[in-house]
Image (spheres, helix red, strand yellow):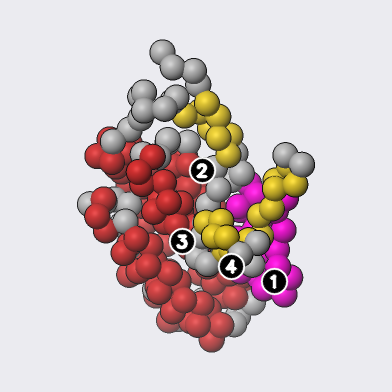
Amino acid sequence: MGKEHRELVYFFVVGFKSGGARAGSCAPGVILRKTGGMIQVRSSVNSSSLSKLVLAFALALLVVVPTAGAAEGELSRGEYVEKLEPICAANGRANSRILKGVKQQVQKRKLVPAGKRFIRASGALGRSIRQMASVPKPAADTTKLNKWFGYLVREKAFLRLIGKSLKSNNKFRAQKLAVKLNRNNNQANNTVIAFGFRECRIDSSRFI
């Protein structure tokens, strides 16, 4: 058996550059720097609620997970999909229960209870993302999957912000965030379209 490595898992979104050289795709407003062997994470957009939520969850997901040495024991793309699909299926069932009837609540202006449901759905998604993060990525797909995970983190943040807006009886802001959520989720699906996900494909019609 090869020597076990341990790696830090980062969840990236789009457009991060450091020192003129591309360092990966990082969530907007989140800056990662390595100084003296230490990873520093901070937000460059202090006024953005979304950036703060993404930053907070990115910090929580800065976890250490085991990976196999070199190519030994590495998952193929198909094997990776097989491991993630049950996690996504469980999250889909959980959120179907949590969000059942939420659109009707919004239409009837029962905004506070609807908002609480969106916040619960955000928490359920966060738990699923952490489970998915524990599955080692195929080396050839790491960049693409990091980008996809970034969109998932933003989905979680959008769900929470929509919930907070509804709890504040701000339906207009919640609707604007829902449009952004739908765009984010379409980008997530397009990023991993070649993987053939079924359960991990995001269906925004469930809640918007």
Residue picked out by circle 3: 151
| Structural distance between the alpha carbons of marks 1 and 3 | 18 Å
For the residues bearing labels 2 and 4, Cβ distance under 8 angstroms? no
Residue in the picture at 42% in, 56% down: 148
Residue picked out by circle 4: 28
- Disc 4 marks which amino acid? Pro
Residue in the picture at 55% in, 35% down: 7
Residue picked out by circle 1: 45
Residue in the picture at 41% in, 46% down: 142
- Packing grade of label 1 (10 A; few <14, some 14-19, many >=20) is some
- Disc 2 marks which amino acid? Arg
Q: Which quadrant would residue 18 be assigned to in this image?
A: bottom right
Q: Classify residue 82 as left or right of residue 127.
A: left
For the residues bearing labels 4 and 1, Cβ distance under 8 angstroms? yes
Furthest-front residue in this view: 20
- Packing grade of label 3 (10 A; few <14, some 14-19, many >=20) is many
Magenta residues (range): 40-60
Residue 53, visible in the rendered structure:
no
